[in-house]
Amino acid sequence: MMKKRPDINELKEKAIKIRSTILKMLQIAGSGHTGGSLSEVEIILTLYKYEMSHNSKKPEWEQRDRFILSKGHGCPTLYAVLADCGYFSEDLLWTLRKMGSKLQGHPQRNVPLGLEASTGSLGQGLSIALGLALAAKMDKKDFRTYCLMGDGELQEGQIWEAAMMASFNKLDNLCGIVDNNKIQIDGFLKDVMNVEPLAEKWESFGWEVIRVDGHDVVGLMDAFDKVREIKGKPSVILADTIKGKGISFMENKASWHGVAPKEDEVEKALVELKKQK
Ligand SMILES: Cc1ncc(C[n+]2csc(CCOP(=O)(O)OP(=O)(O)O)c2C)c(N)n1
């Protein structure tokens, strides 16, 4: 089934806006995860603006598609996209990581705000998503479940337990996405612990694999279209991305994994983002 696509230029502009929002949020918070938030922008944006059936006016609608951010440290992006979709006011974004805020440094389950699961302990999100997908099958519900993982996160054994269970149960209503930015907390995966060959690994666990440029919104929409047609097994989209994407002095630098930008760095970054319009 073909879906109506959003305007591509508007989506690209939105990605730039989301990136600037993320940087401001992190600067105000004074801590947080910059690199991996910037690498996943197009993935989360395409999910919410194109792929998923959801309604911010009815966040508890039973038939809504579910999104599990397994790499929970990347939540600034999710928060910025949820605010853009109308789940809550933008004002809340500036309370990121503050005492008492509903927007903590890792997501805390709050369905009315659009947050489906508490995540951040890496490796667990795919198991949560698997449970939702299995429950949908058992209850004969049509909703789909999407789970975004980091490539470093794939070093967690629990991911592969869930991967086995999902294909065993033929969960074609489950779609994994890997933010394949090639960098984990303190270096390149190839130097710390290589996870490649990724496509072959997922295939051998019985998953359909689609590889795509994770910053290409059209490529991502094409990938989601393909996934919807796959029957009898789960699918994973290996989205090749750049950690710190969009900001020259942050791109491909492990040092920007868990550091928030300072005021002057945000100013420099915003100048770069403006030029991308
Ligand atoms: C179980 C667990 N161990 C360690 C951490 C600390 N940690 C947070 S992010 C991260 C690196 C994750 O790398 P990756 O999945 O590639 O994320 P990305 O590059 O997309 O930010 C680590 C080790 C954690 N959150 N959970």
Image (spheres, helix red, strand yellow):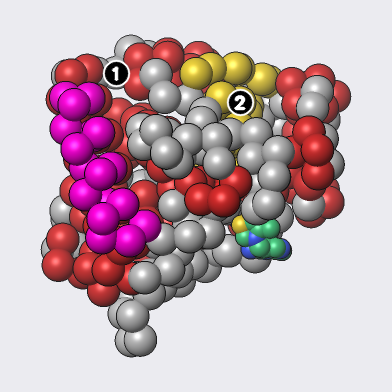
From the image, give the main secondary structure of the stretch colored magenta.
helix
Using residue 210 as the reference point, say whether residue 242 is left or right of it.
left
Q: Quarter of the picture for ligand 1?
A: bottom right
Looking at the figure, which quarter contains the N terminus? top left
Residue 133 seen in the figure: no
Using residue 166 as the reference point, say whether residue 54 is left or right of it.
left
Measure the alpha-carbon separation of dots 2 and 1. 22 Å
| Residue at 42% from the left image edge and 39% from the top image edge | 249
Looking at the figure, which quarter contains the C terminus? top left
Using residue 67 as the reference point, say whether residue 103 is left or right of it.
left
User: What's the amino acid at mark 1?
Assistant: Lys
Label 2's element? Answer: strand
Please provide the residue range marked out in magenta: 261-277
Image: 45 above or below 275: below
Residue 118 seen in the figure: yes
Image location (x, y in percent) of residue 160: 80, 44
Do labels 2 and 1 touch, CB within 8 Å?
A: no
Image: 232 above or below 153: above
Residue 270 drawn in magenta: yes
Using residue 208 as the reference point, say whether residue 241 is left or right of it.
left
Q: In the orientation shown, which residue stands out farthest toward the front?
A: 264
Give the number of the disc on residue 3. Answer: 1
